[in-house]
Amino acid sequence: MDTHYQQVAMSCMNKYVGITTSDGQSHDGFIAHVDQDYITLAIPSNEMIGHMNGMPANTSTYRQFGFSPGFFPRRRFFRQRVPLRFITGLFLLPFFI
């Protein structure tokens, strides 16, 4: 059964997927890497956007068009490895920017 999910994960490489595991957890993210034992997900996080709201602290540093350098809202990713033997479901999810 591991090879089935490994083949599906390889065909969904760099796509946004949902994964459910045998212990009832669910994860969603982009498939970043697949090997014999694990699938590595790149899970999006709004850490910087929530912390600074994507804006500079001082409004006098705004530029006429757009944001000041270094303060453009960024989406960060963190990686999580999921063992293939615990996966009970893998499915594509829509991703909107």
Image (cartoon, helix red, strand yellow):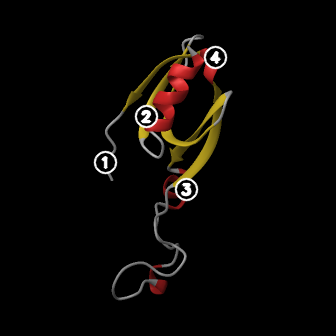
Q: Amino acid at mark 2?
A: Val
Q: Nearer the viewer, mark 3 or mark 4?
A: 4
Q: Nearer the viewer, mark 2 or mark 4?
A: 4
Label 1 – label 2 distance at C-alpha: 13 Å
Residue sitting nearer the eye, 45 or 2:
2
Residue 66 at x, y percent in the picture: 36, 80
Residue sitting nearer the eye, 55 or 10:
10
Which is more N-terminal, label 4 or label 2? 2
Residue at left 50%, top 32%?
Answer: 9
Residue 96's mark? 1
Q: Amino acid at mark 1?
A: Phe
How dense is the environment of label 4, judged by Cα within 10 Å: few (below 14), some, or many (20 and up)?
Answer: some
Residue 17 at x, y percent in the picture: 43, 34
Examine the rendering and report whether any part of residue 26 can be seen. no
Q: Amino acid at mark 3?
A: His
Query: In this view, which residue lies farthest toward the bottom?
Result: 64
Q: Nearer the viewer, mark 3 or mark 1?
A: 1
* Residue of label 4: 85
Occupied quadrant, residue 43: top right
Residue at left 47%, top 81%?
Answer: 68
Residue 17's mark? 2
As drawn, 79 above or below 26: below
Residue 44 at x, y percent in the picture: 50, 46
* Residue of label 3: 51
Residue at left 46%, top 29%?
Answer: 8
How dense is the environment of label 1, judged by Cα within 10 Å: few (below 14), some, or many (20 and up)?
Answer: few
Examine the rendering and report whether any part of residue 50 can be seen. yes
How dense is the environment of label 3, judged by Cα within 10 Å: few (below 14), some, or many (20 and up)?
Answer: few
